[in-house]
Image (cartoon, coloured by chain):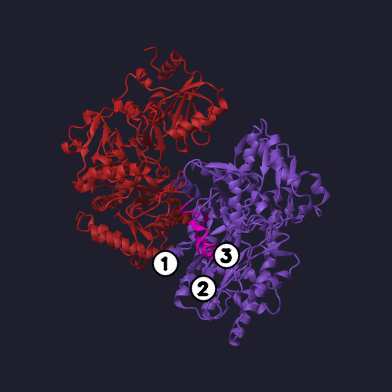
Chain colours: A purple, B red
Amino acid sequence: MQSTCPLSALRNLLKARELDGMLIPRADAHQSEDCAPHDNKLEFISGFTGSAGLALILADRALLFVDGRYQVQARHQVDLEAFEIHHLHEEPIHLWLRDNLPAGKRIAFEPLLMVNSQYENLRASGCDLVAVNDDPLNDIWPARPAAPCGLIKSMPDEISGESSANKRQRVAAALTAAGADYLALTLPDNIAWLLNVRGSDIAMNPVPHSFALVKNNGDIEWFVAREKLHQLSDETLSQVTLASPEDFLSRCEAIAADKRIWLDGDYAPVAVRFAVEAGHGRVIWQPDPITLMKANKNEVELAGYRASHIDDGAAWVNFLAWLSHEVPLREAAGNPITELEAQEKQLEFRKLCDNFQQQSFSTISAAGSNAAMCHYHSSPETNHAITGHEFYLNDSGGQYTNGTTDATRTLSFGQVDAQRRLHYTAVLKGFLALITLQFPQGAQGHQLDAFARRPLWELGLDYDHGTGHGVGHNLLIHENPHRMAKKVNPWPLLPGNILTIEPGYYLDGSHGIRIENQVEVVASQPGFCKFASLTLIPVDLSAVDLSLLNEQEIAWLDEYHLWVRETLSPRVSSEARPWLFEATAPVRARLAG
Amino acid sequence: MQSTCPLSALRNLLKARELDGMLIPRADAHQSEDCAPHDNKLEFISGFTGSAGLALILADRALLFVDGRYQVQARHQVDLEAFEIHHLHEEPIHLWLRDNLPAGKRIAFEPLLMVNSQYENLRASGCDLVAVNDDPLNDIWPARPAAPCGLIKSMPDEISGESSANKRQRVAAALTAAGADYLALTLPDNIAWLLNVRGSDIAMNPVPHSFALVKNNGDIEWFVAREKLHQLSDETLSQVTLASPEDFLSRCEAIAADKRIWLDGDYAPVAVRFAVEAGHGRVIWQPDPITLMKANKNEVELAGYRASHIDDGAAWVNFLAWLSHEVPLREAAGNPITELEAQEKQLEFRKLCDNFQQQSFSTISAAGSNAAMCHYHSSPETNHAITGHEFYLNDSGGQYTNGTTDATRTLSFGQVDAQRRLHYTAVLKGFLALITLQFPQGAQGHQLDAFARRPLWELGLDYDHGTGHGVGHNLLIHENPHRMAKKVNPWPLLPGNILTIEPGYYLDGSHGIRIENQVEVVASQPGFCKFASLTLIPVDLSAVDLSLLNEQEIAWLDEYHLWVRETLSPRVSSEARPWLFEATAPVRARLAG
């Protein structure tokens, strides 16, 4: 070891290899949203822990590119003597390279960590991009965490609703129709869906890191670490040919000659393209067909979602009843409940359910101004008291054996001033406008998004995040391809798609509001669809200006609360039941009372 | 002449040139929506008169591709012994060629009539595309109408609001910023805007057919027929170098060496690309910068729009007052007013205004089931009576010296059944939902479109056209680039943009409803915009179920009608004034009455 400083060590390494620089993205070979510590090279080299970013290490400069969310955090976490902080979107790396480096500089990148569209952008920068395939940082990272080696379990057909053999034939038919010989799979949730397995490489993400090749006759080669397979059924194993993940790229090269290999240009590592081209194969660039197949949930999956939401709803009600009871008492006693205590208690309630496995994402438990940060997670340093004069926002969910949940409620335990009431009412009205919508089958998310924003727009306000995302079936919490957002999303919404509806409003330094239900798209009148709620949690109406609700909005709330009450009252604790009844009372009763 | 049949003549010509086929689109070199008879090769060869389509003539087959609107009309107009009818969108020509012709067939096309994106699609079909530049159909078309030669007039700076010299400098700056040496202009309205001229090659389209080259120092070469220029001011002529349109392509080739030529890939003929490449120049593919400059109207243009709409509104009110008075009398007398009579009378009222020049498009004057055809135009054969028991739809507008108008009203002169009332109310509510919207500055049309559809969606209904389009300033009625529609439109909406808002509903064989105002985008709260109506015409409320309107909708209608009444009452005829007062009465008064 020449140096214990990662940056110096990397620079020595670059010098030895006659490289002018290296790109280090926060990415693994599976474009995972959550990155295993083993794969977090960006944190190793820079100290930055955010969920997105990219470093460029040159001989005499080091640059960290992060998006708007992380401008402050990055400046706290990295050594500003060593790193310049840039904006990931306002100053894209390929433009920075074009404008700041002389053409022909040799810049290294790891083609397993970059997808084709990123690579093509970089290529246009004029740099001489040098692919490095030997994981060079490994040599300078003595304390590197081990690669994740989470056990993989079979997902029974009774829960997935379709055998892997059947799915395989559907995928094979898609390959044949597209004139493809092979499909290269690199997305963990698509592999999990196809093989009817669930993994455990990263907490809360029940998907296995692995690769697969599907032939157009349905044969599957699965490139997965053997150590992960102890608990897999023989039936699952008998349907695939096993190989080591290290052999994936060489196998892609070996099979490629005169073949057409289907790759997803937005998700497959460009390393796969290089392998196919080295083997004299031809790439067919198309979205992974499994992404859309997986998004169209079958009846068994839908039944699983519904059941898991009843379990999750009962846990929510038990939690909210407890919280509503305790907040004023503990505040009066001078020992208020905190964000962290609340989220621990909520997890306890979830754990009472047999089907609960783990959280589906890191809970956002945020009181007062903490909730104004969309991506806030509580820590001992930020842990805020939950009291009667501030909103409390809870965004959480569970992985259940038969489904995945994601919901947000914003709660008030006391007086609400006029501004907060106006904002809360606008968010609720946006939520109701979208959740009550009937829309043509096949409409796209960007066509519907603005319904959730209009009540805020009327006040000259807006929120800077999407309105809804897909949710996997005991898979990833943010499942592609469907989104409802301002950004164009070309995928038609069809019965059986699962989405969230989650408008919000955030006033920096003051408060944050978000109301989120998970929904399924269901057929309604001929050619039209609606959203049917999966989430069963009372919507707090104590901060609403009820006079601003119209008949349609009141009708939806009353019908929803009746359904929640009738479904959950047999399932919640006896302590929680009175709270449930109060929280689901009709709007008319509130107006009268 | 070997034959008087165009198809045989063309086949002989193809044979003589050793071509296997030829593509004949309905297009001119300017991608005009309306095609001069001289340019309507598709009608000459097939007899089809629709506004969009494409023929493929082979030695033994002839195919006509038309869209959904024209499937019926095409079958009436063309010889089905000679032509097969195909669907322009469901079976795109390039896929038909790929799937039905052996590779290497020599298919002729005229590169002046095809844009780059179409050419690239065709190229992928496997055919050997043969560019023909000598207008071959001219030789087999003895009775070909002359090329249009409409006089061109100067548009005074007092009406355009900006001198051509100033516009030229802005365009030159855009070229410099993009690293372009030249901009090749082929769009008639962009040339008209840049030079502050108006043309008359095609009725109702006050734009000149011509080409132009703008250098990055602001110099302009204008390729235009000299015969069109008699009335142009010396000032206008002194600012350009004149050349013949026939010399445009050779000039593009001559200037191209080592130069970067800016072309709009969606509108510039691919012939220009070929010329640039032949001259060893490089093409920069970007939307024509004038398209966006032109869409951001200046204060003088906006004042002109507003004034022209007052003139047009007075003509509408005079017409509607006359119509409302006459329809029952004439029906009772057994001599009902017809669609054609109504539109002639309306034109008379418009002609009373000094600033009126001509109609801005062919009036749609449609009674009863005729209105269910979105693109209906009345003819002696279809001329329907306007009576008390059917809706009457009028969609019309004028070219005024200082602006262009486009509006639609649907009227009822008698009893309206429950279904029509429901449909009319839903269309009105959609119109109101969009016209009352406050939205973030820079929002895109596809984000807003659905507000106008929601009341219909709630009934399981929809309309199969866009919700709004740009309108030129004494230019084209459908002005790019802004659209509000389901289709993605990437152009941000900003103050100074002009649009229509025109939801509708059409029940085949029964009735058609559309309500259309022209609006300007205006700034409102910080970062937000609203629509301000330009159109001043009472909205017929006699077919509305008023109980379905909410407070916001009623408030808008009352405010709008008050503005219409106060603005127009001094300007309409004394006969029309009582009708105007009645038609603009507040909703409350109607509910009370």
Disc number placed over residue A516 in the picture, else none: 3
Whether marks 1 and 3 lie on the same chain: yes
* Up/down of B215 relative to A21, above or below: above
Q: Which residue is mark 2?
A: A369
* Up/down of A469 relative to B77, above or below: below
Residue B476, percent across and down?
A: 31, 42
Mark 3 neighbour class, 10 Å CA radius: few under 14, some 14 to 19, many 20 or more: many
Residue A81 belongs to magenta span: yes
Chain ID at mark 3: A
Mark 2 neighbour class, 10 Å CA radius: few under 14, some 14 to 19, many 20 or more: some
> Which residues, given as a range, are shown in magenta?
A62-91
Which residue in the rendered view is the most extreme toward the right? A234
Q: How many marks?
A: 3
Label located before the other in sequence (2 or 3): 2
Please tell me in which quadrant of the rendered image residue A318 appears.
bottom right
Q: Which residue is mark 1?
A: A459
Separation (CA) of disc 2 from disc 3 = 19 Å
Secondary-structure class at tag 3: loop
Q: Which amino acid, mark 2?
A: Ser
* Up/down of A447 relative to A77, above or below: above
Residue A415, percent across and down?
A: 51, 81
Residue A467, percent across and down?
A: 53, 59
Whether marks 2 and 3 lie on the same chain: yes
